[in-house]
Image (spheres, rainbow, N blue to C red):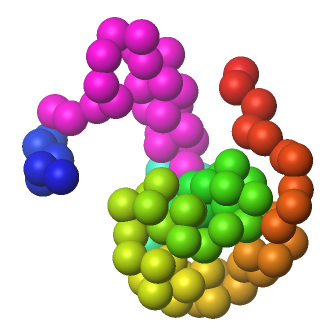
Amino acid sequence: MKPLSPDDRFPDDANDDLNGQLDRLVNQLASQGVTLAQAREIFERQFILASLRLNQGNITNSANHLGLHRNTLRNKVAALQIQAADYRGSSKRIQSS
């Protein structure tokens, strides 16, 4: 994966709405005094949870989906106090808006 540049955004024009949503969310968090560390933790937690839902709690599949080593994801899950087992056998899917 190549490093991000200051002008990087979500790829392709189909995701222009995602860029707008992200800009609004970032501005809202910043105006509420959320630090970068707090925002990073919130985002990382939600992204990991979404991957676990998609992969029904399977750490290995979620790690592959996220581009992480399995042990790295296990460490992050533990640090964020996420219970991957809560998503096993789940038919929950992320709803697109």
Residue 26: % across, % down = 48, 43
Residue 43: % across, % down = 54, 58
Residue under the image location 61 percent in, 55 percent down = 51
Residue under the image location 44 percent in, 32 percent down = 23
Residue 40: % across, % down = 46, 65
Q: Is residue 77 left or right of residue 8?
A: right
Q: Is residue 10 left or right of residue 84?
A: left
Residue 92, relative to residue 19: is it above or below? Answer: below
Residue 89: % across, % down = 87, 61
Q: Is residue 12 magenta?
A: yes
Examine the residues drawn in magenta and state their main secondary structure. Answer: helix
| Residue interval drawn in magenta | 7-29
Q: Is residue 16 left or right of residue 82?
A: left
- Image quadrant of residue 36? bottom left
Residue 26, relative to residue 89: is it above or below? Answer: above
- Image quadrant of residue 15? top left
Residue 43, relative to residue 79: is it above or below? Answer: above
